[in-house]
Image (tube, rainbow, N blue to C red):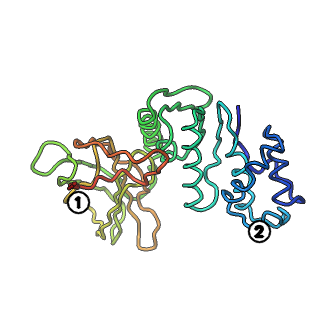
Amino acid sequence: VGALIEVRAGIHPDLTGRENAYLYGSLLGLKRAEVAKRFDDIVEFAELGTAIDRQVKWYSSGMQMRLGFAVAAFLEPDVLLVDEVLAVGDALFQQKCLDRMRAVLEQGTTLVLVSHDLAAVESICTRGVWLEQGEIRADGPIRAALRGYRDSVEEESGLRLRTDEPVRLTHCDIRGVDRPGVTTSAPMAVDLDFATERTGPATLHIGVTEGTASPVFTARREIFLGWAGNEVRCTIGQLPLPRGRYALWVGIYDSDGHPLMSWAPAKQFDVAGPDLDTPPRAVVMAAPVYVEHVWET
């Protein structure tokens, strides 16, 4: 069993990168000859170049993490435990880390990935176990486990709704236009109504998420809050979402950006349509956007 838990734990600041590669490798159970065999690959993977012979105390924290990950990434165990270490370096290096995880899987290694990066988890894992306070809340196919987790995040956010703010949502309806349900690539209408304790200009923001607070897309509108008649409709001409369950989040802010009604989930809705095309393994999708397309040969 190999482990990538704290990739800087075995890095000594007074040693060079080269010396640390051998030291950290020995701590991970690699023989010196095994580290030497992989040394050039480790340096190339960590993108350290000539800095490999510099004392690590002069490395940035990112360089130290890349060195530690590079050494640990070339372990070849039967089971590899990876705990929250994929947020290393820039986006290109993170993709390199994911590619390395994919290569490890292709060698027959069982990967146990512990992470709150849902997109990375979905890109590389086939089975998901959702743990909360030491108890298993879900165990099954990765998308089903993530769906349960996202629903829980939305539910918890809904329970935290503030009641002391001057604006509150009194009505929310999400529906298809000229059809009974919401469908991929078809128009969708969102009807909102608000009650307010103050009048004046404000900015209304809406967003659609998979359950977390990070939206797939957002829309905004300058509105004027009055004592009555604060009904607003937003029509999305072609909904760019694949089949699945989503949540509408709503927030209203004054001209200085202060919340009159904090960003929070308003309502869940289901989208009927095609499934999202899955990318290659270990390729992270930023958002579930469906694009109409036609292939020709």
Judge from the rendering whether residue 70 lies leftward or rightward of residue 102; answer left or right.
right
**Foreground of the two, 2 or 86:** 2
In the image, residue 286 above or below residue 203:
above
Say whether residue 80 is visible.
yes
Residue drawn at x 29%, y 50% is 241
Judge from the rendering whether residue 87 lies leftward or rightward of residue 276; answer left or right.
right
| Residue type pointed to by label 2 | Thr
Q: Quadrant of the C terminus?
A: bottom left
Residue drawn at x 13%, y 51% is 177
Where residue 17 sits: x, y (%)? 81, 59
Residue drawn at x 44%, y 40% is 150
Judge from the rendering whether residue 297 lies leftward or rightward of residue 217; answer left or right.
left
Q: What element does badge 2 sit on?
A: helix
In the image, residue 275 above or below residue 68:
above
Judge from the rendering whether residue 242 lies leftward or rightward of residue 140; answer left or right.
left
- The residue indicated by pointer 2 is 50
Residue drawn at x 29%, y 68% is 223
- The residue indicated by pointer 1 is 234
Say whether residue 233 is visible.
no
Where residue 174 sits: x, y (%)? 23, 48
**Foreground of the two, 62 or 97:** 97
**Foreground of the two, 16 or 42:** 42
Instruction: Determine which of the numbered discs, if any, sits on residue 202 in the image.
Output: none
| Residue type pointed to by label 1 | Cys
Mark 2: give few (<14), some (14-19) or many (20+) Cα within 10 Å: few
Q: Where is residue 158, by image quadrant?
A: top left
Q: Where is residue 77, by image quadrant?
A: top right
Q: Nearer the viewer, mark 1 or mark 2?
A: 2
Q: Quadrant of the N terminus?
A: top right
Where residue 259 sits: x, y (%)? 45, 62
